[in-house]
Image: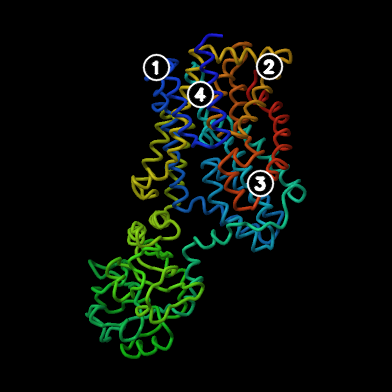
Amino acid sequence: MPVQLTLTFIILGITVVLFMTNKIRADLVAILALLAFVLTGILTPVEALSGFSNSVVIMIAALFVIGAGILRTGLAQMAGTLLLRYSGDSEKRLFILLLIIVASVGAFMSNTGTVALMLPIVVSIAISINSSPSKYLIPLSYMASFSGLLTLIASPPNLIISQMLVDNGYEKLGFFQITPIGIIGVIVGLIYLYSVRNLLLPKGKKASNSNQIQKLATKQLALDYQLGGNLYLVKVPVGSEMIGKRLAQLKIPATYQLCILKISRKSTEGLNLLPMTYQEMAGPNSIIQPKDRLYVQGSAENMEKFVEAYGLSIEKGTSEADELVSKQLGIAEVLLTPHSKLINETLRTINFREKYNLNILGINRQGEYVDKDMSKQRLRFGDALLVQGSWESIELLSRETGNVVVIGQPKEHASMAAASGKASIAGAIMILMVLLMVFEVFPAVISVLIGAALMILTGCVRNMDDAYGQINWESIVLIGAMLPMATALENTGGMVLLSKGIIQLLGGFGPLGVLGGIFLLTMTFGQFISNTATAVLFAPIGLSAAISIGVSPYPFLMAVAVGASMAFSTPVASPTNALVMTAGGYQFKDFVKIGVPLQFIMLIVMMIAIPIVFPF
């Protein structure tokens, strides 16, 4: 065996072992492997870096932005709303609808994004019907993997095999060309998971992070801090003494121990044919105008004195959850760090409101909630503060890492708040992108880039910083660094050697035997390394095997894409498995017990389905 071929297999072998052990991040492993190929002379620097200019890498990056727009605008959340509406309290109906909705959403989003979206919804629904979340979460992860076979853009392996075909002079895959395979997978997966849900899935386990999931919901914080009954909406009549005065002049906190959180008023500019209602956070320089509506926090006794003094009227039906969180304003929980300069200081002395432009609604002190005379309270280490203000101010506070830690992700909430109400725009952009790809108006990568750009321009994704933040750069670097490995196998003759080995071993069974061997190998490796890395490694082998026996490469590359997505038997096989393992309190054996039978079923089903949809 030539020296370079031997070195190629040694480098690939070490790379696979490092992927399996997970001791080093996958993207770093791929870069190290790439450097090894260059240093040994197997690849030139130009060949080594060619993967980062590949259209697949650009397309996947753009798809992360599109997925963010779908998530931010609440378009994907509508799927959860449908689930709540139609499942009722029926466990069977919930289970089936859940998997159907996951498959539908996952056809246009990454499987990780799909699971992250649906996980808190599923946990809360399961708890509400007195069922164990663990009965639903592994099926949630598995169905997200099946949904990756429904459209060309649903999974990186699909894009990789399509590009592999183009690079070798074949027609690329159409947007819905793989959909029949995906539908078969979804149906078989649904039947299997429904059949074993009470047999193999663990019973009685509570979601270990269900409390955290609920805690991170900003509207839930209003309930946690016992604000019920402490928020009032008052209207300022035309003749009130407050009109024309700044809040600093009125000294309401000192006189009445009340805090005005925000002001809602109608615009009076222009012709005013369609007066717009807008909100602003109340600050020392806010000037009260006639017919303003003030959101005031405080005790009922103090409110009575305040209302009587200024001739105000209290409006009924105020909801803390609805009024404290909006597109512009939000709430967040803040912890003091051990060495915070705020410790032993009072809110009055640190001028918290003036410094951070945020109101403090409550203090959680070791489980006891303080919401009275807060300005006189000395802050202690371990205190948690509930703050309210603009999302931008909360985001700025999160950067004060020396003094405070903001719980949750204010940047995420700010982005979602900014994009809320634009679900129809995101839906239209997604439909446009699909139509451009189906009718091949532009190359696929250009169609996807158009979709990503429109998501940013229309505000479905807040700005370019937000767009860059949504891209999973680990995946991008991993794919870009892995793609040239196919060139290394080709340059050294490794691809031909591996394909010949499979043909010699299984060629006696005909093309179907070789197809089964490639599917089984791809599926096995996919239990320990990412589906992207698996597809990159086995796509050139599948192509070479098809050419060697003189048949169409389409079924062989399709077997690679499907096999790489069948990541069911281990929790490390897919990020979605890792997500639900924590949330559902699963053990390693749970994935083996449920996943291994499913994989053998899929092996049999796909050996029948793939040659029918993609003939030899």
Give the Cα separation between the discs numbered 2 and 4: 22 Å
**Front position among marks 2 and 4:** 2
- In the image, taking residue 124 as reference, residue 269 lies left or right, namely left
Give the Cα separation between the discs numbered 3 and 1: 45 Å
Seen from the viewer's position, the closer of residues 89 and 201 is 201
For mark 2, give the secondary structure.
Answer: helix
Marks 3/1 in contact by CB < 8 Å: the verdict is no
Seen from the viewer's position, the closer of residues 193 and 84 is 193
**Can you identify the residue that label 3 sits on?**
139
Task: Please give the label number shown on residue 511.
Answer: 2
Q: Earlier in the sequence, mark 2 or mark 1?
A: 1
For mark 4, give the secondary structure.
Answer: loop
Q: Earlier in the sequence, mark 2 or mark 4?
A: 4
Task: Please give the label number shown on residue 44.
Answer: 1
Marks 2/1 in contact by CB < 8 Å: the verdict is no
Q: What's the amino acid at mark 2?
A: Pro
For mark 3, give the secondary structure.
Answer: helix
What colour scheme has been applied to the protein in the rendered image? Answer: rainbow
Task: Please give the label number shown on residue 172.
Answer: 4
Q: Earlier in the sequence, mark 4 or mark 3?
A: 3
Give the crowd class for mark 4: few <14, some 14-19, many >=20 residues within 10 Å: some
Q: Earlier in the sequence, mark 3 or mark 1?
A: 1
Quarter of the image for the C terminus: give it: top right
